[in-house]
Image (cartoon, grey):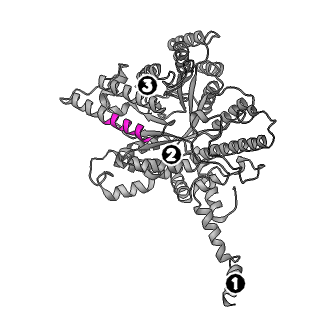
């Protein structure tokens, strides 16, 4: 009897407020993968060959009502509570003009100091402090095991792809040609070897059907001199690039070449085009009549007035020479260090250029791209005439649009929504779609990433519902099942390396985003709403 009374009393107490705290605990600490699986969706990444079909592990229909749209789900609900709180606090700091500049100054001192006390790789206290704050937020790990753990965690939240970058950075000298020291040859060889070893290790870490990002300037001062003077790569670097791309091609890993300052970009474009000619062809295991695929990607910066003409020129070269053009489209990263005349006059013009280039690439149409080139009236008359003559000569019906691969790398939510809407329209009409992923930096724009994840979950749920209906009604044609649904694939750009190596990367990223305070405020608000919902239990779900 006593036992029964105790059970009854315990059952009554469960409904009292003191026990309701357990519900709050579950809401705060439920692992992201459990929230993803609540939809009946697997967190297993989708391979390129499976883009038109749902992941093989999708077996059960979602538990959420089918009438619920992905828009009603919080765009930051994929974050665990510790990650959410850390992201909110760091974002709040970076959106404050009074905090961001002193923070950049302090981090810059750490990144460039030779002192033991300011070296995170030698000072264990400083190492611990940085690693558990900004490093954990924006970097993937110091070794392969830590990077793999980060990748596994991101996949559990619904992120399907990874762009992994080795963090090695070099000190840009005032004169990159000043490499005539007595040990210049040895120094150059050491720089190239260290850079290449880091890239090869990155290729060993990253899973198949993902991306590795490389930054040519990380290979040292001799490489910078060659880039600045539009010379071929040093022989040792050329050998390594062949090995890197050959290994990537065999593992079906894609290489993204980062954009850099305008001083080096023409050389980067030339080197990258040569690699694309060799490696952006059909896979060795493909059928003889298979189309080429993009293994090597170049980066195009939408804030540059010259971007539309450069992109058109490279598209035409790819079309003429029958290789695929890999395109990573970004807005730009060197606004504070480049001549102002290179850029569009306003953010609105930059947005229009970015969205126009994205539309042209997604729809495989010349017109949106050439329209943006026509809008470029700020180049000097001689170069403008030459660019336009080349542009309009190439933009004719006799030049077919080449096969492309596209990385739409942006933190702009509206650009992602516009691209997704266009892709959904293409899917519903049965049009062929280009190989494309969305990408955001680790630790940034999580509200953008989350909205794309929610859209992917919604699309996969629709596929499951259609397959369920077809199973119940075999008379429905199978061909109408999944090809008319677009599943957005979202990637995170991860940087790995020691805390000391990554500190230079963190300074550069912070400086690049000084002009993005308004966007950071938008992210902070989205994160704040989710923190409020997790703690108090109401708001966006």
Q: CA distance from mark 2 to mark 3?
A: 25 Å
Residue 229 lies, in percent from the top left, at 35, 20
Residue 322 lies, in percent from the top left, at 53, 15
Answer with mark 1 or mark 3, whichever residue precedes in sequence: 1
Q: Which residue is mark 3?
A: 265
- Quadrant position of the N terminus in the picture: bottom right
Discs 1, 3 touching: Cβ within 8 Å: no
Q: Which residue is mark 1?
A: 9
Q: Which residue is mark 2?
A: 442
First to last magenta residue range: 194-205
- Classify residue 386 as left or right of residue 499: right
Q: What residue is rendered at 59% in x and 52% in y?
A: 524
Q: For the residues carrying marks 2 and 3, which lies nearer the camera in this image?
A: 2
Q: Find residue 437 and name its label.
A: none
Answer with mark 2 or mark 1, whichever residue precedes in sequence: 1
Discs 2, 1 touching: Cβ within 8 Å: no
- Classify residue 363 as left or right of residue 305: right
| Rendering quarter of residue 56 | top right
- SS assignment at label 2: loop
Residue 168 lies, in percent from the top left, at 36, 39
- Classify residue 496 as left or right of residue 379: left
Q: Nearer the viewer, residue 334 or 313?
A: 313
Disc 2: CA contacts within 10 A as few (<14), some (14-19) or many (>=20): many
**Residue 398 appears in view:** yes
Answer with mark 2 or mark 3, whichever residue precedes in sequence: 3
Q: Nearer the viewer, residue 5 or 168?
A: 5
Q: What residue is rendered at 34% in x and 32% in y?
A: 219
| Rendering quarter of residue 315 | top right
Disc 3: CA contacts within 10 A as few (<14), some (14-19) or many (>=20): some
Q: Nearer the viewer, residue 284 or 244?
A: 284
Residue 38 lies, in percent from the top left, at 66, 54
**Dominant SS in magenta:** helix
């Amino acid at each position: 009897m006593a036992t029964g009374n105790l059970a009854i009393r315990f059952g009554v107490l469960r409904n009292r407020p003191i026990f309701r705290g357990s519900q709050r605990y579950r809401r705060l600490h439920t692992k992201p993968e459990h929230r993803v699986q609540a939809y009946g969706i697997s967190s297993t990444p989708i391979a390129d060959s499976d883009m038109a079909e749902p992941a093989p592990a999708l077996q059960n229909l979602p538990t959420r009502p089918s009438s619920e749209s992905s828009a009603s789900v919080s765009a930051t609900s994929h974050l665990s509570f510790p990650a959410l709180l850390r992201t909110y606090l760091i974002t709040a700091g970076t959106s404050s003009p009074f905090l961001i500049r002193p923070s950049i100054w302090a981090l810059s001192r750490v990144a460039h100091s030779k002192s033991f006390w300011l070296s995170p790789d030698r000072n264990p206290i400083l190492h611990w402090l940085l690693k558990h704050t900004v490093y954990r937020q924006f970097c993937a790990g110091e070794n392969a095991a830590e990077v793999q753990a980060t990748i596994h965690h991101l996949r559990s939240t619904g992120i399907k792809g990874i762009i992994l970058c080795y963090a090695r950075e070099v000190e840009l000298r005032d004169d990159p040609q000043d490499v005539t020291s007595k040990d210049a040859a040895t120094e150059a060889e050491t720089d190239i070897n260290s850079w290449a070893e880091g890239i090869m290790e990155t290729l060993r870490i990253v899973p198949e059907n993902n991306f590795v990002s490389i930054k040519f300037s990380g290979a040292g001062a001799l490489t910078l001199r060659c880039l600045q003077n539009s010379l071929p790569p040093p022989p040792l670097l050329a050998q390594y690039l062949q090995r890197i791309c050959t290994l990537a091609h065999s593992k079906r890993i894609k290489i993204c070449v980062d954009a850099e300052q305008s001083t080096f970009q023409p050389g980067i474009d030339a080197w990258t085009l040569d690699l694309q000619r060799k490696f952006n062809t059909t896979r060795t295991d493909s059928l003889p009549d298979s189309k080429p695929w993009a293994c090597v990607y170049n980066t195009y910066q939408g804030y540059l007035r010259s971007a539309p003409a450069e992109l058109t020129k490279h598209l035409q070269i790819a079309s003429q020479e029958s290789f695929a053009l890999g395109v990573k489209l970004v807005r730009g990263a060197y606004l504070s260090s480049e001549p102002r005349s290179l850029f569009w006059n306003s953010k609105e013009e930059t947005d229009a250029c970015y969205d126009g280039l994205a539309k042209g690439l997604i729809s495989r149409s010349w017109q949106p791209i050439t329209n943006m080139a026509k809008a470029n009236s700020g180049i000097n008359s001689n170069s403008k005439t030459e660019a336009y003559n080349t542009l309009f000569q190439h933009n004719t019906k006799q030049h077919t649009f080449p096969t492309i691969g596209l990385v739409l790398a942006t933190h702009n939510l509206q650009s992602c929504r516009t691209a997704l809407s266009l892709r959904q329209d293409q899917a519903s009409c049965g049009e062929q779609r280009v190989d494309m992923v969305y990408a955001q930096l680790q630790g940034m724009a999580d509200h953008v990433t989350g909205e794309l994840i929610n859209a992917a979950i919604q699309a996969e749920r629709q596929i499951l519902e259609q397959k369920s209906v077809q199973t119940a009604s075999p008379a429905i044609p199978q061909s109408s099942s999944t090809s008319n649904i677009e599943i957005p694939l979202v990637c995170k750009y991860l940087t790995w390396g020691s805390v000391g190596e990554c500190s230079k990367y963190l300074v550069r990223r912070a400086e690049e985003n000084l002009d993005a305070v308004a966007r950071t405020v938008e992210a902070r608000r989205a994160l704040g709403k989710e923190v409020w919902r997790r703690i108090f239990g109401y708001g966006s779900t």
